[in-house]
Image (spheres, grey):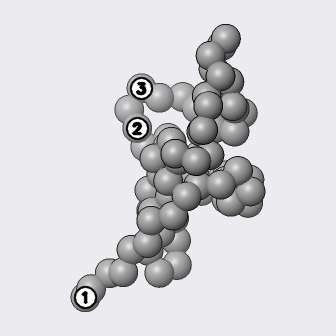
Amino acid sequence: MKENYNIKLLTKEFCLENIEKILEIIKLIPDVEYKKEDILAEKKGDRILYGKWEHSLVLLDEKNIVGVLT
């Protein structure tokens, strides 16, 4: 069976709408303990995450989010 995947920008709006699924995927990374606030943050400590939403991606199959790159 051939899967069709799409890569698109992970906008803040899309992230807010799908935060639970995105958090579920990120929690699969060993030794990483992100919370919703961490995923949505545009600053990390004193560092501003310039262009976060312009450089974050989401991988979708025909129905679901299957990966994220932030």
Residue beneath the point at 65% across and 54% down: 11
Q: Position of residue 9 (x, y in %)?
A: 55, 58
The outermost residue toward the top is 46
Identify the amino acid type marked 2: Ile
Q: CA distance from mark 1 to mark 2?
A: 27 Å
Residue 46 can be seen in this image: yes
| Label drawn at residue 42 | none
The outermost residue toward the left is 1
Q: Position of residue 6 (x, y in %)?
A: 43, 72
Q: Which residue is mark 3?
A: 31
Q: Secondary structure at mark 1?
A: loop
Q: Which residue is mark 1?
A: 1
Q: Position of residue 69 (x, y in %)?
A: 45, 47
Identify the amino acid type marked 1: Met
- Along the polypeptide, which appears first: circle 3 or circle 1? 1
Q: Which residue is mark 2?
A: 29
The answer to whether marks 3 and 2 mark residues whose Cβ atoms lie closer than 8 Å is yes
The answer to whether marks 3 and 1 mark residues whose Cβ atoms lie closer than 8 Å is no
- Along the polypeptide, which appears first: circle 1 or circle 2? 1
Category of crowding for the residue at label 1, using alpha-carbon neighbours closer than 10 angstroms: few (below 14), some (14–19), many (at least 20): few
Residue beneath the point at 74% across and 56% down: 13
